[in-house]
Image (tube, rainbow, N blue to C red):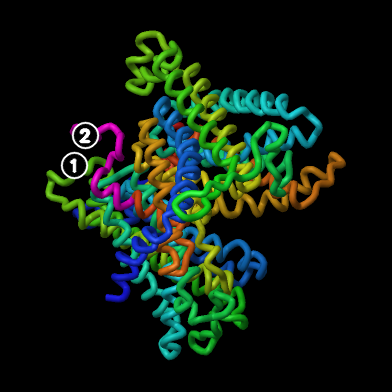
Amino acid sequence: MDMLYKVFIEPFVFMGEAPDLLIQTLWEGLVSGVLYALIALGFVLIFKASGVFNFAQGIMVVFAALILVGLYEKGVPAFLALILAALAMLVLAMVVERVVLRPLVNQPDIILFMATFGLTYFLIGFGELIFGGSPREMITDQLFLPQGTTEVDMLGGMVRFQHLDIAAALIASIMIGLLAVFFSKTRIGRALRAVADSHKAALSVGISLNQIWVIVWFAAGIVALVAGIMWGARSGVSFSLQIIALKALPVLILGGFTSIPGAIIGGLIVGVGEKLGEFYWGPLVGGGVETWLAYVIALLFLLYRPQGLFGEKIIERI
Amino acid sequence: MLYREAGQFKTNYVADSAIFPLREDRIGLALIILAAYALAFLGSSFLLQAVLIPFLVFSLAAIGLNILTGYTGLLSLGTGAFMGVGAYACYKLMTAFPGVNVIVWIFVSGFFSAAVGALFGLPSLRIKGFYLAVATLAAQFFLQWCFIRIPWLVNYNVSGALDAPLRTLFGTPIMGPNATPQTRYLVVLTIVILLTWLASNLVHGRIGRMWIAIRDMDLAAELMGIRPLQTKLLAFAVSSYYCGVAGALLVFLWYGGAEYDVFNINQSFFILFMVIIGGLGSLIGSFFGAALIFILPIVLGIVLPAMLSPFGLSVGADVIEHLRFMIVGALIIFFLIVEPHGLARLWQIGKQKLLVWPFPY
């Protein structure tokens, strides 16, 4: 009984008693949710256009951030470094398309998945070889990212908003909006959607798959760069960021592998869910539930809706 | 000339489904096993401890994952955690009942991870492919959290680490600080051979055919009367059993003690690499994959400095480490491009060529 009370009653009573803490937790959840969504977005872009489950997205986030910081440390001005990092992602996209994707056309999904694993290993080694393995600070001031906090008096307490978090949420939203416009309004965007629908049909109306893949990997690289800057500003640039990228997987499951709105809503659900779980229920089992809660939420969710919130219905034919 | 099937007729169904229908295969296998045992007496303890024992342990884990991913077609990223369950179960059992021989507990501990594996395999009925892979990540992270947060699992040990107590077999220490690499190698080798033989029988028999039917088309298999839930759960259980035993061997007969961190997500990926590079749906491929993925970095660590030194490039250990990562990554991509069916396919081609040798076809 006592246990049941602690699980089902007490956290809610606590929420009601201290609404400012609830708001604070929700806010933190929303911010990390937006950032998860940003990483998940990179996965979705590539999965939609090429059917490749890109495991290397996480390392691309780290890699992009590392290039940016590494170049800045070598004396390159911050904005030039940003442009160079974006160019590096373009080069990466072209190399990946030429060396990895093109020879593996028509292979089963799992083979392509494994190939992105190989890519991950390669990029880890390459990144460490050039920039060293030590964690770094993200250059926030030089990129005009705001620092500091605002405390707002509300609901009988102070709620702290980090300026950086606000900026992160804004930039991520702008990014997502831009991608949405790009996908629905531009010629290339429509070609991307055509490829996502059917490779063969897209080929037959004269869309070059190779070009599309480069564009898509480049777009994912840019998303990775933005995600890398944001995550890097919050928790430093190091290879441990990769684990954060794995968190994007339950987000994908919740939202469906092929849906951009799904990635965003899934990200918010996971972000808020795990922060609430950690803060209100975590102490019951000794804390640290953040590491797995997202996966368990996703798992339970899958049992009811195997294709995710917005995923395409899976139709099988014999 | 030496290796041909001419004159070896199969006269009944049992002979047709035999594991090694060719006499040459049987002789070859006997030679390999003999050589493996001989290595225990010929090899240096570095070779046994740093190369052969881990190679065998990882092969066993790769066989486990291969049963699930290669034969049944269910992608799993929770291998590391299932290995951990085996190791922790083995630790609890052998410290709770020190009177029973530890070999028994190594085999029994597999059943615990089989139970856990079957539990986390339940979603496989509803979901498949990458969705299932992510679902098994839940097992990975949840179990790893359990290893950290439940001190009961390590008998309230302050360090939170598993350590191998002294255990003997026929009066010889096989576990703990006094056991020589030689005896540990012999124990591991025997267990791996036994379990591989068992797996080989499983996958060649009725159960294996059920798994393969589910893999190739689960809907069609269901229409033919194969019950998907039981078959998939059985695959999860058997696979986790192998992983659990491999985990117990890894901690107690190789490392001699370990922390929860050994069973992290990277271990799962590592085993998956072995399975895919070795060849999905092939037992011998599991051995090849383990050999390539585990031994290649060791060899590179030795060869790279020697290769670079003539050019006046003396490089630090960290650079070697980074180069190793790059080369392994590049090789994985290379192998996938030239031989997506894995090393086992090369083995088959080689055998085919041998059958017709010295003629081209």
Q: Relative to B207, is A219 above or below? A: above
Determine which residue is flagged by label 1.
B219
Chain letter for the residue marked with disc 1 in the picture: B
| Residue lying farthest to the top in this orientation | A206
Q: How many marks?
A: 2
Which quarter of the rendering shows the C terminus of chain A?
A: top left
Q: Which residue appears at 43% of the width and 11% of the height? A: A187
Q: What type is the residue that disc 2 sits on?
A: Glu
In terms of secondary structure, where does tag 1 sit?
Answer: helix
Image location (x, y in percent) of residue A72: 75, 33
Q: Which residue appears at 22% of the width and 51% of the height? A: B210
Q: Which residues are magenta?
A: A299-318
Q: Nearer the viewer, mark 2 or mark 1?
A: 2
Image location (x, y in percent) of residue B252: 53, 74
Res A22 → quadrant:
bottom left
Image location (x, y in percent) of residue A234: 61, 45
Determine which residue is flagged by label 2.
A316
Chain letter for the residue marked with disc 2 in the picture: A
- In magenta segment, residue B314: no
Q: Which residue appears at 56% of the width and 41% of the height? A: A165
Q: Relative to B236, is B360 above or below? A: above
Q: Is residue B25 visible?
A: no
Image location (x, y in percent) of residue B154: 49, 78
Q: Relative to B90, is B137 above or below? A: above
Q: Which residue appears at 57% of the width and 63% of the height? A: B52
